[in-house]
Each structure stands twice: as C-alpha cells, then as structure tokens.
Image: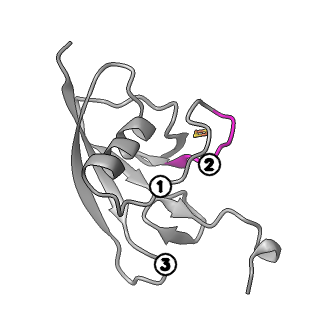
Amino acid sequence: MTKTIARLRVRRGTAGEAVSRYQEFAVPFEPGTTVLDALISIRSQQDPSLAIRYSCINANVCKECLIAIDGEVRYACTTRLRHDAVMTLDPLPGKPVLRDLVTETRPPRERLK
Ligand code: FES
C-alpha cells in the first residue's frame, strides 16, 4: 500500500517561555493512522524531545491525549490524519503549558509547591 504524507504543525515551547513557535513535521501514513500514531512516530524517528501525553492509545479511556487539533479540542488517539491540508496541533487551551503539547491537568490544590 502506498503511503501518503501528513504535514503537522506542532506548537513547541516550555513553561515560562515568552514566545512559543510551531515546528512542522512530515509523517508518512496509511489510512486509519491517528494523530497520536503520528506524534509517537515523530518522537521515535524524528525528534525525541517532542513532549506528548497519552496512556491508553485506544480511544477515550485515559483522556490524556486531549489537545487542540485545528482549533478544536479533540482526542489525538481517535483523530485521523489528513493528507489534504496541514494539521495544526496546540496544547489544550486554558491550561498552563508544561512543554510542547503537554499541559498541567491536575487541580491547583493537588500540585506540589
Ligand atoms: S490516549 Fe487515552 S484517550 Fe487518547
């Protein structure tokens, strides 16, 4: 089967950084490949410093892969890659960013000071 190329614009940056930036990755994929599959592939084959969060890989169990995909909050593990447009990935809006696509999700009173 011929692989197609997905292009992902991924927000990069760490907590406290004044300016974050986007980095674009090209990922070969087959139909059915998810955004989370692509992010895992990027980490293993292109840039191990990319921070992502997930636990279950298989849809709506852990809810840790929630990110903004093209401006909508969606599960990375259930969102399929597209080949017809660049997909923009941002951390969950309204949460403090720890690094790249990983946000602080614990309630404030549970955080260590
Ligand atoms: S990885 Fe667990 S819900 Fe997406």
- The image quadrant where one finds ligand 1 is top right
Badge 1: residue crowd in 10 Å (few <14, some 14–19, many ≥20): some
Separation of marks 3 and 2 at Cα, in angstroms: 18 Å
Which residue is at 28% across, 57% downward?
A: 47
Q: Position of residue 31 (x, y in %)?
A: 33, 19
**Which structural element holds mark 1?**
loop
Q: Amino acid at mark 1?
A: Ile
Q: Earlier in the sequence, mark 3 or mark 2?
A: 3
Scheme of colours in the image: one colour
Q: Amino acid at mark 3?
A: Ala
Mark 2 residue CB less than 8 A from any atom of ligand 1 = yes
Q: Earlier in the sequence, mark 1 or mark 3?
A: 3
Q: Nearer the viewer, mark 1 or mark 3?
A: 1
**Which structural element holds mark 2?**
loop
Which residue is at 74% across, 81% downward?
A: 112
The residue beneath circle 1 is 52
Q: Position of residue 41 (x, y in %)?
A: 33, 42
Q: Earlier in the sequence, mark 2 or mark 1?
A: 1
